[in-house]
C-alpha cells in the first residue's frame, strides 16, 4: 500500500493529493501539466513536497509533521524515466548491474542473465546504449530498475518515444513482470487508449487534484473526450501460439490461452509466439449465431461491462479472453445489450494486426 | 652550470606537480561551482579567476605577502623544514595558482554539460553521493577535466612572472622560461636559448593539440 498525502505549490499551480494506492498496476492519467511527473518525483524523493506524508507498506518515507525525508536511495523504489536515462558511458550489462543489490534479502532478487532473459535483451548485453532502439532502451531501463530489487516501481511515460506496435508489446511484457514479481507499479501516462487495457487501477489527475480512483471500468465514465482520449482506437492485445499453416487456404491457425483464431497466412514458424492487436472498433457483435458470413472467426461470449467514454460506448465481453468492443449508443438500444447477455463476437481475419 | 636537459626536466617536474596538486582541488571547485549554491560563491569564483587577468608579477607578489619567509604560514613551513619561498617548491605553487583558473573553468563547463538527470537515475538505483560522483558525473565529464588539466599543465610550463618573484631566478628554481630569460640577458646567450625556445614551442603546441582533440571528442559525444 502506498499512502500519498502531498502538497506542493508552484507559481501558478498547486498539487494537492490525498490517496491510498492498493498494490496493483496503477495507471495515473492526466493531461500534460496536470502534475503527474511532479507526483512521481515526490514519491521517488527527488522532489520535496511542501507538506504531507508518504508511506510505503507502513514505512514512512516523508512526513512534514515528523520532519522526516528518506533519501531516494533508501526508499526501495524503482524509477523508469521517459527518456530511458541509460548511462551513456556504460555498456548495457554494466547499466543493468549498476543498482544490483548484493546483500539485499528481497524475494525479488534476480541474476543479470535471468533478468536479461525475461526482458528479452540477452543479445544486447555487450552493446552500448547509443546503439539501441527506443524500445530496447526502455527494456534495458526496466531490467536495470528491477535488478535493484525495488518494492515499488514508478514509470513516467516510458513509451512516449515509441511506435504503436512497440508500445503494446512493451506493455504486455510489463504486465507479465508485474504479475510474476507481484511488483506494484505506478504508471504515468496520457496514453489512455493503450494503457487502460493493462491497468488494474486508474487514478485520474486534473489540475493537480485527484479526479477519480478505482478500477478502469469505474472511472472510464469520468474520462471525458479530449484532451485525455485521443481518437486512437482502444486496442485488444492477445498473445497466441502459431498452431499450423494451411497454405492451400492461405491461412494460419493460432491459439491464445483459451481461444483459436484463423488469420491470413503468417510468415512465422509453428510454435512461435505472436502478439496480436485487434482494434476495439473492428469487432462486430451479433445477438444470434451468424451463418453464411465470410468472416471465419466467430466466438460466443457474455457481456461483463458496458462503459461510456464520452460519446463512445465500450462493451467488455468475456469469450474465454476478455475483449473490449467499441459501438455507438444506438446499437446498445437496438440490440438491447446489457451486462450478462450472451453475444457473438465476429472477427475479420484481416483486422488482426501482428505486433511481435 | 645546469644543462638544458636538467632545466627541461625541472620544468616538467614543476608543471607535473602543479597539475597533480591542482587536479583534485580544481575538480572539486569546478564541481562545487556547477552543482552547488552557497553564500560567497561568486566571491570565491572571482578570487580563483583573478590570476587569469592579474599581471603574474602581482600574483607572485601576493604569494610572497601571504606565504613568504616572514609570514605566519612561511614560518610554520620553516619549522617543519619545508622552505617554500625562493625554492623550486615556490615555482610549483606559483604555477599552480596561475594555472588554476584554466582548470576550474574547464571542469566547471564539463560538469555543467553532464545532465543531472543521470545523477537522479543513479540515485534511484541506490547509489550514494560519492558513488554518483565517481561512477557517473566524473566519468561523463572526464574528457573535459583532462582537457582542462592539459591546458593547466601547458600554462604551468610557461609560467614566468609569478615564479620569478616568488621563487626568484635561482638555479634551484630555474625553469625553462626563467632560463631563457637569463640566456637572453647574456651576450651571445641567444645561441644557448634556442634549444629551450624550441622545446617550449613543441610542448606548448602538443598541449594545445591534445586539448583540441579532447574538446572535439566531447563535441562528437554530445552530437
Image: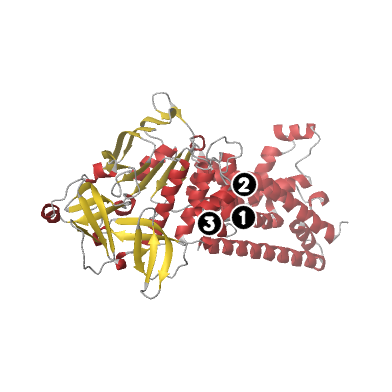
- Residue B54 seen anywhere in this rendered image of the structure: no
**Residue that badge 3 annotates:** A121
**Other residues around mark 3 within 10 Å, as few (<14) / some (14–19) / many (≥20):** some
Residue A11 percent coordinates (x, y): 30, 41
| Of the pair A112 and B45, the residue shown nearer to us | A112
Q: Using the rendered view, name the quadrant where residue B220 is placed.
A: bottom right
| Of the pair A61 and A307, the residue shown nearer to us | A307
Nearer the observer: mark 2 or 3; the answer is 3
Q: Could you tell which of marks 2 and 1 lies nearer the N-terminus?
A: 2
**Residue that badge 1 annotates:** B148
Query: On what subunit does the disc labeled 1 rest?
Result: B
Residue sitting farthest toward the bottom: A248
Alpha-carbon span between mark 2 and mark 1: 9 Å
Nearer the observer: mark 1 or 3; the answer is 3
Find numbered disc 1 in the image and state the secondary structure of the residue it sits on: helix
**Other residues around mark 2 within 10 Å, as few (<14) / some (14–19) / many (≥20):** many
Residue at the spot x=81%, y=68% of the render? Answer: B191
- Residue A71 seen anywhere in this rendered image of the structure: yes
Figure quadrant of the C terminus of chain A? bottom left
Find numbered disc 3 in the image and state the secondary structure of the residue it sits on: loop
Task: Name the image colouring.
Answer: secondary structure
Mark 2 and 1 residues: CB-CB less than 8 Å, in contact?
yes
Query: On what subunit does the disc labeled 3 rest?
Result: A
Figure quadrant of the N terminus of chain A? top left
Alpha-carbon span between mark 1 and mark 3: 39 Å
The disc placed on residue B26 is 2
Q: Using the rendered view, name the quadrant where residue A344 is placed.
A: bottom left
Residue A193 percent coordinates (x, y): 29, 54
Residue A132 percent coordinates (x, y): 51, 61
| Of the pair A171 and A191, the residue shown nearer to us | A171
Amino acid at each position: 500500500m502506498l499512502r500519498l498525502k502531498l502538497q506542493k505549490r508552484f507559481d501558478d499551480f498547486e498539487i494537492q493529493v490525498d490517496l491510498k494506492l492498493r498494490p496493483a498496476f496503477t495507471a495515473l492519467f492526466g493531461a500534460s501539466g496536470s502534475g503527474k511527473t511532479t507526483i512521481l518525483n515526490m514519491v521517488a524523493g527527488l522532489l520535496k513536497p511542501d507538506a504531507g506524508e508518504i508511506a510505503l507498506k507502513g514505512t514512512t518515507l516523508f512526513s512534514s509533521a515528523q520532519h522526516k525525508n528518506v533519501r531516494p536511495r533508501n526508499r526501495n523504489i524503482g524509477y523508469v524515466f521517459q527518456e530511458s536515462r541509460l548511462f551513456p558511458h556504460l555498456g548495457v550489462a554494466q547499466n543493468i548491474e549498476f543498482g544490483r543489490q548484493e546483500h539485499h534479502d528481497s524475494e525479488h532478487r534476480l541474476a543479470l542473465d535471468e533478468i536479461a532473459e525475461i526482458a528479452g535483451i540477452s543479445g544486447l548485453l555487450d552493446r552500448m546504449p547509443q546503439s539501441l532502439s527506443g524500445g530496447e532502451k526502455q527494456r534495458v531501463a526496466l531490467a536495470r530498475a528491477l535488478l535493484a530489487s525495488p518494492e515499488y516501481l514508478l514509470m513516467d511515460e516510458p513509451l512516449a518515444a515509441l511506435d504503436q506496435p512497440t508500445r503494446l508489446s512493451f506493455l504486455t511484457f510489463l504486465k507479465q513482470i508485474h504479475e510474476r514479481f507481484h511488483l506494484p507499479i505506478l504508471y504515468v501516462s496520457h496514453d489512455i487508449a493503450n494503457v487502460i487495457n493493462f491497468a488494474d487501477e486508474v487514478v485520474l489527475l486534473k489540475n493537480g487534484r485527484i479526479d477519480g480512483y478505482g478500477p478502469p471500468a469505474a472511472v472510464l465514465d469520468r474520462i471525458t473526450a479530449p484532451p485525455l482520449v485521443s481518437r486512437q482506437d482502444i486496442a485488444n492485445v492477445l498473445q497466441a501460439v502459431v498452431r499450423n499453416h494451411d497454405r492451400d487456404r492461405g491461412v494460419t491457425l493460432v491459439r491464445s490461452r483459451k481461444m483459436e483464431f484463423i488469420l491470413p497466412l503468417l510468415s512465422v514458424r509453428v510454435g512461435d509466439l505472436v502478439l496480436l492487436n485487434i482494434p476495439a472498433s473492428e469487432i462486430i457483435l451479433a445477438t444470434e449465431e451468424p451463418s453464411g458470413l465470410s468472416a471465419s472467426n466467430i466466438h460466443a461470449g457474455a457481456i461483463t461491462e458496458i462503459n461510456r467514454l464520452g460519446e463512445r460506448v465500450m462493451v467488455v465481453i468475456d469469450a474465454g479472453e476478455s475483449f473490449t468492443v467499441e459501438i455507438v449508443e444506438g446499437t446498445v438500444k437496438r440490440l438491447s445489450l446489457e451486462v450478462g447477455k450472451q453475444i457473438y463476437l465476429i472477427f475479420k481475419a484481416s483486422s488482426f494486426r501482428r505486433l511481435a | 652550470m645546469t644543462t638544458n636537459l636538467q632545466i627541461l626536466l625541472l620544468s616538467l617536474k614543476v608543471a607535473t606537480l602543479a597539475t597533480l596538486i591542482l587536479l583534485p582541488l580544481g575538480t572539486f571547485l569546478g564541481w562545487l561551482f556547477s552543482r552547488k549554491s552557497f553564500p560567497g560563491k561568486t566571491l570565491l569564483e572571482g578570487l580563483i579567476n583573478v590570476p587569469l587577468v592579474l599581471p603574474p608579477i602581482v600574483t607572485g607578489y601576493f604569494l610572497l605577502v601571504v606565504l613568504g619567509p616572514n609570514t605566519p604560514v612561511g614560518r610554520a613551513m620553516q619549522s617543519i623544514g619545508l622552505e617554500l619561498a625562493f625554492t623550486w617548491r615556490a615555482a610549483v605553487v606559483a604555477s599552480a595558482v596561475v594555472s588554476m583558473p584554466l582548470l576550474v573553468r574547464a571542469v566547471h563547463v564539463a560538469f555543467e554539460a553532464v545532465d543531472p538527470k543521470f545523477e537522479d537515475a543513479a540515485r534511484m538505483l541506490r547509489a550514494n553521493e560519492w558513488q554518483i560522483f565517481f561512477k557517473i558525473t566524473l566519468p561523463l565529464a572526464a574528457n573535459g577535466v583532462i582537457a582542462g588539466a592539459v591546458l593547466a599543465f601547458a600554462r604551468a610550463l610557461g609560467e614566468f612572472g609569478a615564479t620569478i618573484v616568488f621563487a626568484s631566478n635561482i638555479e634551484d628554481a630555474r625553469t625553462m622560461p626563467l632560463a631563457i630569460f637569463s640566456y637572453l640577458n647574456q651576450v651571445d646567450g641567444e645561441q644557448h636559448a634556442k634549444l629551450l625556445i624550441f622545446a617550449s614551442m613543441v610542448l606548448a603546441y602538443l598541449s594545445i593539440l591534445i586539448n583540441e582533440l579532447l574538446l572535439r571528442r566531447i563535441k562528437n559525444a554530445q552530437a
